[in-house]
Amino acid sequence: MKLLTTVLLVLLIALSACAPSLDWREVNPAESGVRALFPCKPEVSIRPATPTEPGRMGLAHCKAAGLSFALAWAELADPAQIAPALLQMRLSVASKLAATAAPPQPMQLPGMTPNGEAQWQSLSAPSQQAKVAVFSRGLLVYQLVMTGAKPDDVAWENFMASIRLDS
C-alpha cells in the first residue's frame, strides 16, 4: 500500500510539473466582433451604447504566469476618429507605465480595416514590460495588451496571432 501511495504521489508531481502555466482557450466576447486565445479565463465587462455615449465598449482581461492579458474594444461614431483613437490607445499604455517605447511595427490582420495607425510595439518600464497592439474593423477599434515583469515573446506571439475578426 505504501508503494502504491508513493507511486501515485510521484505520478501526481510529474503530472503537475507538466501542466502548462498558460492554458490557452478561445474567447469571443459578446458584441466585440473578435475572437482571441487567452491563456486564462478572462473577466469580460461590456458597456452598451447609451444616448449620451453612443458607442459600445468592452474589456476582456486575465492574469496567468505573472502576465496580464487584455483585449479592449470601442465603437466610434465617426470614421475620422479611428486613426486618432488608435494612436491614443497605443500611446496611453506607454504613458501609464512611464515606459520607453520601441519603434512601432505595422499591424496586419486578415479582415481588419487598413489604417496607418494599426501598429504594435514593445514597451519597457523599470519594473514592467509590455506589448501593445491596436487595429480596427469598420467603426470598432481594438487594443491588445500584455504586461509582466519579464517579457514573454512566445506568449505575445500566441496572443496576437490568435486574433480572428468575425465575418
Image (tube, rainbow, N blue to C red):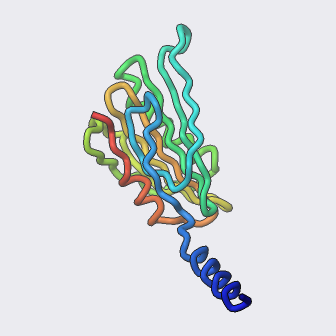
Locate the C terminus and report the quarter of the image it occupies: top left
| Residue at the front extreme of this rendering | 1
Viewer-proximal residue among 18 and 29? 18
Viewer-proximal residue among 17 and 72? 17
| Residue at the top extreme of this rendering | 51
| Residue at the bottom extreme of this rendering | 3
Q: Residue at x 67, y 82 (%)?
A: 9
Horizontal and vertical percent position of residue 36: 42, 46
Viewer-proximal residue among 104 and 165? 165
Q: Residue at x 58, y 32 (%)?
A: 45
Viewer-proximal residue among 131 and 103? 131
Horizontal and vertical percent position of residue 65: 61, 63
Q: Residue at x 47, y 41 (%)?
A: 143
71 with respect to 98 (left or right): left
Q: Quadrant of residue 96?
A: top right
Query: Compared to 58, does 16 lie above or below?
Result: below
142 with respect to 48 (left or right): left
Q: How many marks?
A: 0
55 with respect to 47 (left or right): left
Locate the N terminus and report the quarter of the image it occupies: bottom right
Horizontal and vertical percent position of residue 150: 59, 66
Q: Residue at x 49, y 22 (%)?
A: 56
Horizontal and vertical percent position of residue 155: 47, 62
Query: Compared to 36, does 32 lie above or below?
Result: above
Q: Quadrant of residue 157?
A: bottom left
